[in-house]
Image (spheres, rainbow, N blue to C red):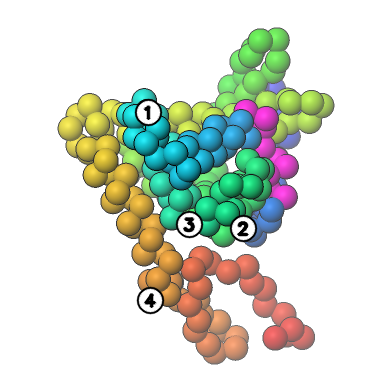
Amino acid sequence: ATPEEELTLRSLFRQFQTAVLTYDPNAVHFLSDSSIQYYDNLLKVVKLATFDPKSYNVTKNNIPIGVRTNAEIIKTRLSTEFIAKVTPVELYQTAFQQGWIGHNTFQSASVDNFQAFDNNGKRYITADFYYDGTVKDEFVARIGFTKDTDSWKVDLLPIFMAIEKAIELKVQQGKIKPDVSIDATVQETQKNLDQDNWPPFSSNIYNFIAHFPNTPVHQNDPKLH
């Protein structure tokens, strides 16, 4: 990638990261068409599991484990009425606004090592995606950047693919069993719905502690309480 492209994409990533960390629904506008398509496919799996469980049980072993896990989490978090009418964009916005997709990872995320490729005549650039758990997870994910129209967009597909490959490797090594792993992940996310498990947030200026499901957006202003 050229120095100019790297500068542009670092700025784009910071803007996207800020949108995610402030629960901004407009974060979805930074995403590539292929990222939205991924959530369109995910939504189809969710609807199949919700409204036609018999067909879902027949086909679920052909569905990637990460997708199945996300589908089960969405089923437990959202009502059937909402699932029936939600669009892929609205699903992504809901996930960001509620802070249950990407929020913790993006708190420590950074990008480096930009590389350019030709993708069917289009410029496509990837970068290493680092975060707090990179070493623990034993793999470095990549994040993509593509020009869907005239402007650069963030492509999350390389991250999703890296996660799936890491899960598949652990299954092959016998470290996890798919159904057990999915159930455990869903149960863990359910704990976040219990107010007793919400992390504390404290303010030294106003001398209080409160519990929120995720880190709240806040500012210190002597004139504002």
Q: Secondary structure at mark 2?
A: helix
Q: Which residue is mark 1?
A: 59
First in sequence, mark 1 or 2: give its number: 1
Residue 97's label in the rendered image is: 2
Q: Amino acid at mark 3?
A: Arg
Whole-percent x, y for residue 92 in the image: 61, 46
Residue 114 in view here: no
Q: Secondary structure at mark 3?
A: helix
Residue shown at 22%/38% (left/top)?
Answer: 176
CA distance for labels 3 and 2: 13 Å
Q: Viewer-proximal residue, 171 or 104?
A: 171
Asked if the residue under mark 4 is in contact with the one under mark 1, i.e. CB atoms within 8 Å, the reply is: no
Q: Viewer-proximal residue, 93 or 137?
A: 93
Q: Amino acid at mark 4?
A: Asp
Whole-percent x, y for residue 53 in the image: 39, 40
Q: Nearer the viewer, mark 1 or mark 4?
A: 1
Question: In the image, is 94 to the left or to the right of 151?
Answer: left
Asked if the residue under mark 2 is in contact with the one under mark 3, i.e. CB atoms within 8 Å, the reply is: no
Q: Is residue 172 above or below residue 136?
A: above
Q: Amino acid at mark 1?
A: Thr
Residue shown at 46%/45% (left/top)?
Answer: 50
Q: Which residue is mark 3?
A: 77
